[in-house]
Image: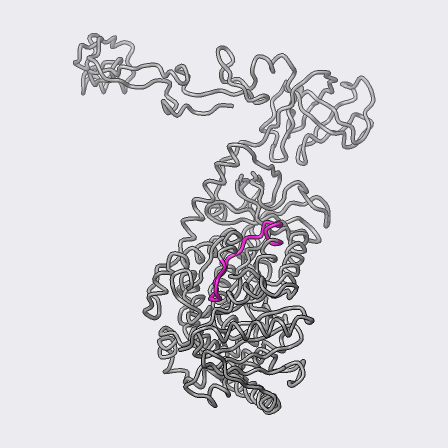
């Protein structure tokens, strides 16, 4: 076993200069030639060109060489196959060092080995397969079987017994004559077929040939027959099948994320090829590090996001470009590495458009990498009822991930959280995710807390660059989606406009996105789509609404889209109207010291429960009517229940996240938490402290400035 010396490139010397050839004195011609010793061809050359100096080859110069000090002129470093020690002197090029040579070597044949790798006179490990009258048949690996003839046996052997044999002779048709040996002291060397390593991108042209591939195991799937290993190198993936027995796990020690070398025959399976695995071993140490480095370097290059011009001009978007590119690159990298992606989004119009923008971008890429059924193994979208990553959400996500690992041998997923994930409320769930090695990415526009960045791989939030919640998650994610997959642009270009009207954005960018699609959707069309999303989200609960959301967002049949949105809006508006007619007569209003008009509504006792619209939507609709009633004045609306309050405002300079933190400190025993945007949000508290919390909240609202 040897490694080429990198100092001399395997030559054993370095050239330091040239000198005149001492034989021909620089002429390049030989002084004398024995014509009787020349062949017919050499004679013809001599007669035509004259004699050439054999010392310099006719150049007239010779190289001045210095022996390489790194390898002592050998051109290579020889290492013992047993202990790995360097071999010098008489042992260079041999298999073992002097210390190990004092012990007998016994070879253990890898399953890739054939009789071509065996040599007469050497010792091999074997296992007794069956016993016949004329001798004992033994297996040297899964493919090689030999006979210990009864004439060579000195004792008895049992089926399944391990026995060391000496290869005495290879007879015709590959039959082996073996002699058993009992050896007390020996060294075992694993022997495998010497095959060049082939890349995943090359094997499609090698059907019928035996090859060796090296790479990272990204999935292990047990079928009713073989175990399927998906192995990825720097050029792509190859599926390998290993069979132990029907439904039995082959190579149980090989799991996802391991670097392996697999040998087998390439077979054709429809439009693809498969490696019929004969042997597979985990690689460690320098070899593992080298392969990982190659794979990571190639993936890093392939994962570079598209360079895009934003669909609208925006100073905030330009400032966010580095963070958005990082998010896009990490998502592309996860797809290339076949890391499952779990997409979490808030269950409202903004969150849904944000989630669907990313979904439309990544599913074609997932299928490209993992086949047409890759979507079902490597992608999942799940809505979050709260505008943050609840512990309920993360427990469900971890449970599903562990099931997928057990069932499909996958990696832990990359969680991509959109329209939530930026606040302290997310941290408890993030801590649980970290325990299991789950990495997270956030694209959000809620007012961020810097503590969350400790748990995130990447984070996009307009507040980081001086923007505000007017730049909605749907806008951000649509631009990120274009960085991930530029081909999806035409399909998703209307999503930012839906997100803008759904989240009531007053940002300049919102107007531009709405204007950009005005040739296809009127402002009322966009509002109807947003309302239909909110209405359907309420009934979907924790279901992702696949298919239905596509129709609402006009990704399929346009006629179905129009009819469905019309129907959902009629039902939603009817229920909203009924709810508001009940609630308005129970709203209590008062003037605050800062000139704002405060409106409060007990949604627990004076609104229909367990139906649409929910408390948050009810409070928002009541607030809209009150803003029209008190047009031109600052208005605050609080819809409260036993242990929560929803805050909506217009023309009031509030900072709800800061108020929540202050209430948490000031109302002892109140259990206050919550958050949201600066002027729109919600808080929770313990039921018994409702009066104290709400009184303190109103006091704080009355002290802030108004527009």
Can you say whether 659 is above or below 18 in the image?
Answer: below
Q: Residue furthest front?
A: 593
- The quarter of the picture where residue 16 lies is top left
Camera-nearest residue between 474 and 117:
474
Camera-nearest residue between 405 and 539:
539
Q: Is residue 665 left or right of residue 483?
A: right
Which region is colored magenta? 432-449
Whether the magenta-drawn stretch holds residue 33 is answered as no
Can you say whether 334 is above or below 158 in the image?
Answer: below
- Residue 121 visible? The answer is yes
Q: Residue at x 56, y 81 (%)?
A: 619
Colour basis: one colour
Q: Position of residue 11 (x, y in %)?
A: 37, 21
Q: Position of residue 7 (x, y in %)?
A: 37, 23
- Residue 374 visible? The answer is no
Q: Position of residue 416 (x, y in %)?
A: 52, 60
Q: Is residue 253 left or right of residue 324?
A: right
Camera-nearest residue between 58 and 616:
616
- Quadrant of the rendering where the C terminus is positioned: bottom left
Q: Position of residue 696 (x, y in %)?
A: 57, 71
Can you say whether 221 is above or below 13 in the image?
Answer: below
Can you say whether 229 is above or below 149 in the image?
Answer: below
Whether the magenta-drawn stretch holds residue 448 is answered as yes
């Amino acid at each position: 076993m040897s490694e080429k010396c990198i100092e001399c490139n395997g030559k054993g010397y370095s050239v330091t200069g040239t000198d005149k050839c001492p034989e021909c004195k620089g002429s390049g011609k030989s002084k004398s030639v024995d014509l009787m010793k020349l062949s017919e061809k050499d004679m013809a050359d001599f007669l035509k060109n004259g004699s050439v100096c054999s010392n310099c080859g006719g150049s007239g110069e010779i190289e001045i060489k210095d022996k390489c000090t790194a390898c002592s002129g050998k051109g290579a470093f020889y290492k013992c196959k047993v202990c790995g020690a360097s071999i010098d002197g008489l042992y260079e090029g041999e298999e073992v060092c002097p210390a190990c040579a004092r012990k007998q070597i016994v070879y253990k044949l890898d399953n890739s080995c054939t009789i071509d790798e065996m040599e007469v006179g050497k010792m091999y490990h074997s296992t007794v397969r069956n016993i016949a009258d004329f001798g004992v048949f033994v297996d040297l690996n899964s493919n090689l079987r030999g006979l210990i003839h009864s004439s060579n046996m000195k004792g008895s052997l049992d089926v399944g017994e391990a026995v060391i044999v000496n290869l005495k002779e290879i007879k015709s048709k590959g039959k082996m004559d073996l002699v058993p040996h009992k050896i007390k002291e020996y060294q075992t060397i694993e022997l495998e077929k010497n095959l060049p390593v082939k890349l995943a991108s090359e094997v499609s042209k090698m059907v019928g040939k035996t090859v060796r591939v090296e790479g990272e195991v990204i999935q292990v799937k047990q079928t009713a027959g073989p175990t399927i290993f998906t192995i990825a190198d720097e050029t792509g993936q190859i599926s390998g099948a290993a069979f132990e027995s029907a439904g039995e796990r082959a190579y149980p020690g090989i799991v996802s994320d391991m670097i392996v070398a697999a040998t087998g025959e390439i077979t054709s399976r429809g439009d693809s090829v498969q490696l019929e695995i004969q042997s597979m071993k985990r690689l460690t140490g320098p070899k593992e590090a080298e392969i990982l480095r190659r794979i990571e370097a190639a993936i890093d290059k392939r994962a570079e996001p598209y360079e895009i011009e934003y669909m609208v001009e925006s100073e905030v978007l330009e400032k966010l470009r580095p963070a958005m590119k990082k998010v896009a690159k990490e998502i592309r990298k996860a797809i290339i590495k076949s890391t499952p992606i779990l997409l979490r989004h808030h269950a409202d119009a903004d969150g849904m458009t944000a989630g669907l923008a990313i979904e439309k971008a990544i599913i074609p890429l997932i299928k490209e990498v993992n086949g047409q059924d890759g979507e079902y193994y490597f992608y999942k979208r799940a809505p979050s009822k709260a505008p943050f990553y609840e512990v309920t959400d993360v427990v469900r996500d971890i449970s599903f991930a562990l099931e997928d690992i057990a069932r499909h041998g996958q990696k832990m997923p990359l969680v991509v959280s959109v329209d939530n994930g930026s606040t302290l409320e997310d941290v408890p769930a993030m801590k649980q995710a970290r325990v299991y090695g789950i990495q997270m990415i956030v694209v959000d526009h809620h007012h961020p807390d810097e503590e969350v960045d400790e748990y995130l791989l990447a984070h996009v939030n307009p507040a980081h660059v001086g923007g505000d919640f007017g730049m909605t998650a749907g806008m951000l994610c649509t631009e990120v989606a274009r960085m991930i997959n530029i081909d999806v642009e035409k399909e998703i270009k209307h999503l930012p406009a839906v997100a803008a009207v759904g989240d009531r954005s007053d940002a300049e960018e919102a107007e531009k996105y709405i204007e950009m699609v005005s040739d296809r959707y009127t402002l009322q069309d966009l509002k109807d789509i947003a309302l239909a999303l909110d209405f359907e989200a309420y009934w979907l609960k924790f279901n992702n609404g696949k298919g239905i959301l596509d129709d609402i967002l006009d990704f399929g049949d346009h006629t179905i889209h129009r009819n469905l949105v019309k129907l959902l809006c009629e039902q939603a508006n009817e229920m909203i109207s009924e709810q508001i007619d009940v609630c308005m007569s129970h709203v209590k209003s008062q003037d605050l010291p800062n000139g704002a008009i405060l409106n409060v509504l007990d949604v627990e006792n004076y609104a229909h429960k367990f139906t649409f619209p929910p408390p948050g939507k009810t409070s928002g609709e009541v607030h809209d009517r009150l803003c029209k009633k008190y047009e031109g004045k600052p208005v605050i609306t609080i819809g409260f229940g036993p242990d929560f309050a929803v805050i909506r405002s217009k023309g009031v300079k509030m900072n709800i996240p800061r108020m929540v933190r202050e209430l948490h400190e000031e109302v002892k025993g109140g259990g206050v938490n919550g958050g949201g945007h600066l002027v729109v949000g919600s808080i929770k508290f313990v039921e018994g402290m409702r009066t104290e919390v709400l009184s303190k909240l109103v006091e704080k609202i009355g002290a802030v400035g108004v527009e």
